[in-house]
Image (cartoon, grey):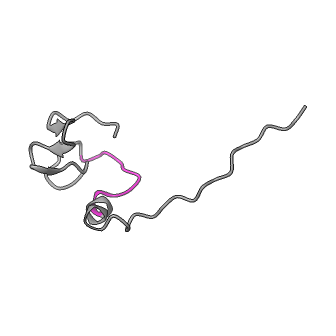
Amino acid sequence: MSFSCPHFDISTELCRRLKCECIPGRPGCVLPKATKFAVSAADRIAASNHPQKLPQRKARPALRRPAN
């Protein structure tokens, strides 16, 4: 993850403030409320309970440069 939080324990990947799995943006999180996430906190919380719920990205073919 790419964020900075004084309550994030790197060794266990847990939130020391909430004493549970770190999910940025969840209720009680200290990250700014204006922070935008690609996947909402509610969806990530639901997915942490059911790991198969998050949609998987489709693989895209690599871009090729035209031969000169």
Which residue is more in the foreground, 39 or 67?
Answer: 67
* Magenta residue check for 61: no
Q: Quadrant of the C terminus?
A: top right
Q: Position of residue 18 (x, y in %)?
A: 10, 49
Q: Position of residue 48 (x, y in %)?
A: 27, 61
Lateral position of residue 39 relative to residue 34, left or right: right
Lateral position of residue 61 relative to residue 51, left or right: right
**Which residue is found at the position 25% from the left and 66% from the top?**
49
Q: Is residue 5 above or below residue 21?
A: above
> Magenta stretch mostly in which secondary structure?
loop
**Which residue is found at the position 25% from the left and 48% from the top?**
24
Lateral position of residue 22 relative to residue 19, left or right: right
Q: Position of residue 52 (x, y in %)?
A: 38, 67
Farthest-out residue, front: 11
Which residue is more in the foreground, 64 or 30?
Answer: 64
Q: Is residue 1 above or below residue 40?
A: above
The magenta segment is 33-42
Q: Quadrant of the N terminus?
A: top left
How many numbered circles does the render carry? 0
**Which residue is found at the position 33% from the left and 58% from the top?**
40
Q: Is residue 55 above or below residue 11?
A: below
**Which residue is found at the position 9% from the left and 49% from the top?**
19
Q: Position of residue 26 (x, y in %)?
A: 21, 54
